[in-house]
Amino acid sequence: MRTPNDILGLGIFVICVNVVLMLVKIVAGLLGNSYALVADGIESASDIFSSLITWAGFQISLKPPDEDHPYGHGKIEPLAGMFSGVALLSAAAFICYNSVVEIRTPHHAPAWFTLPVLIAVVLVKEVLSRKVLTASATLDSNALKGDAWHHRSDAITSAAVAVGIAIALIGGPGYESADDWAALAACVVIVINGFLIIRGSLHDVLDGKVSGDLHASISSVAAVTPGVVNTEKCRIRKSGIHLFVEIHIRVDPSISVFDGHHLGHQVKERLLAANPRIRDVIVHIEPAKVA
């Protein structure tokens, strides 16, 4: 698992790169007569703001429990994820509006140098997206996944605009708005992923079911603990990147309360050692059925 310092360093790096790309796109768009590129650059400004909120929320979610928040601050993470999803939808609406305006407004074809600029932007944005997606998969974070899709949506939009500019340059008169049509088409992909991010974050806020593999791995660790006959129920609640586990284990009904209590602690210690994401475990002791 990445450390909090690694995550913070990645967030700062991502935001700095976004600032540079925003300036490059706006300047190249103004000089190269590509209003779609200017709109893309302005949309990158919203990405910077969104990233600041997302990464700040993620850092706060890592804070340990305190007197007022005995279960920690993990729920801030899916709330930050929902913000990322809403920001994606807002970005799509902004791009869509500007694309329609530019399609209806006669203008000159973009300059040729806007094409290599966009290709470079696509490559950089995709690299950023993959780095943040790797971190989000490692930590199972919808907030970081949402930020990664901000970068990927930017790459998709820029790639679509690049295709449109290439069509405009090759097609000549009558194809000046091809880049705007391409940006408009890219909005569909952005909207779909915005809804997916919101749905996943809402699932976590409502303590939705975790993956079957995670559930099976936690149950199996408890089941093989010496003295445990089998497991009955296992409930797992995700709070940010951390997990809270409530598990029922069946034991020999003839053992003493002291032995049952000791066995419960053994199960808890094994689960905490097996998965560093588990923050706390509650073990319920149930008597096994006698054949």
Image (spheres, rainbow, N blue to C red):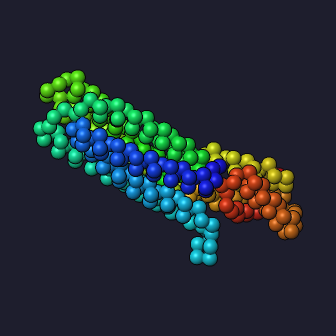
Q: x, y (%) of residue 21?
A: 38, 44
Horizontally, residue 38 falls left or right of residue 233, namely left
Question: 3 or 248: nearer the eye?
Answer: 3
Farthest residue toward the bottom?
A: 67
Residue at image position (39%, 38%) is: 121
Note whether residue 52 is visible: yes
Horizontally, residue 219 falls left or right of residue 112, namely right
Horizontally, residue 86 falls left or right of residue 141, namely left
Question: 181 or 288: nearer the eye?
Answer: 181
Note whether residue 233 is visible: no
Question: 75 or 104: nearer the eye?
Answer: 104
Q: x, y (%) of residue 56?
A: 49, 61
Q: Is residue 29 above or below residue 256?
A: above
Residue at image position (45%, 46%) is: 17
Residue at image position (51%, 45%) is: 132
Please count the marks in the image.
0
Horizontally, residue 42 falls left or right of residue 283, namely left
Q: Is residue 69 above or below residue 171?
A: below
Q: Quadrant of residue 281?
A: bottom right
Farthest residue toward the top?
A: 170
Q: x, y (%) of residue 210?
A: 58, 51
Residue at image position (30%, 45%) is: 26
Q: x, y (%) of residue 86?
A: 37, 55
Q: Is residue 52 above or below residue 22?
A: below
Q: Quadrant of residue 25?
A: top left
